Amino acid sequence: MVVLLSVVGVLIIAVLAAVAWYLWQKVWKAEAQLQQQQKEAQESELKRLDHIYESLNVIAAALLEGQVRVAEACIRMAVLLSNLPLNCDSKHRFAAIFEVYNRSQHIPTHSKWQELDKKERRRFEQELLAIESEFSEQIMAAAQYIKENPFGNGQSHQVIH
């Protein structure tokens, strides 16, 4: 009888050990999958940030070279900058970009612009020119700053990491 109980005890211990091993295998596999997903998410986020950084650098250069008007550059840059965790210094440095964006946001673009009559277009064009004139110096200074301190080059003052 003692032998039988010993055998049953050993079998129970063996089954419990097998179940424990199986469950640990599941845990290790789940942890490995989680680490892989986190790595992929981090790589994806880095690619997204690199794309934003590159776009900001290109727009700033295009603005400095006169290839794009101030309002258009500000609209594009404000959208990109709003997708970055800017620190206080950067928010202050790029405040004029956001101001131009906010003041010109109501002006129709693309097909809506084409639907406007000449009088409305002229009125909006004059409004854009006034906004650009008011902020041009600050916007060009911000673009020059970006040219001299490009995004994505480890500039810790530009975004919080």
Image: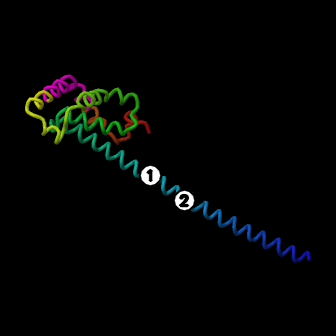
Between discs 1 and 2, the one toward the N terminus = 2
- Across and down, in percent, residue 34 comes to 53, 56
- The N terminus - image quarter: bottom right
* Residue 7, disc: none
Residue under label 2: 32
- Across and down, in percent, residue 14 comes to 75, 71
Q: CA distance from mark 1 to mark 2?
A: 14 Å
Q: Residues within 10 Å of mark 1 (few under 14, many from 20)?
A: few
The three-letter code of the residue at mark 1 reads Ala
User: Per the image, is 9 magenta?
Assistant: no
The three-letter code of the residue at mark 2 reads Ala
Side of 27 relative to 102 (left or right)? right
Q: Residue at (17%, 34%) from the top-left corner?
A: 69
- Across and down, in percent, residue 22 comes to 65, 67
Residue under label 1: 41
User: Per the image, is 126 magenta?
Assistant: yes
Quarter of the image where one finds residue 94: top left
Quarter of the image where one finds residue 157: top left
Q: Nearer the viewer, residue 97 or 127?
A: 127
Q: Residues within 10 Å of mark 2 (few under 14, many from 20)?
A: few
Cβ atoms at labels 1 and 2 below 8 Å apart? no
- The C terminus - image quarter: top left
Above or below, 96 against 39 in this view is: above
Q: Nearer the viewer, residue 153 or 103?
A: 103
Q: Main secondary structure of the magenta part?
A: helix
Q: Residue at (29%, 44%) from the top-left corner?
A: 54
* Marker count (numbered): 2
Above or below, 145 against 22 in this view is: above
- Across and down, in percent, residue 111 comes to 16, 42
Q: Which residues are magenta?
A: 125-142
Quarter of the image where one finds residue 95: top left
The residue lying furthest to the left in this view is 118
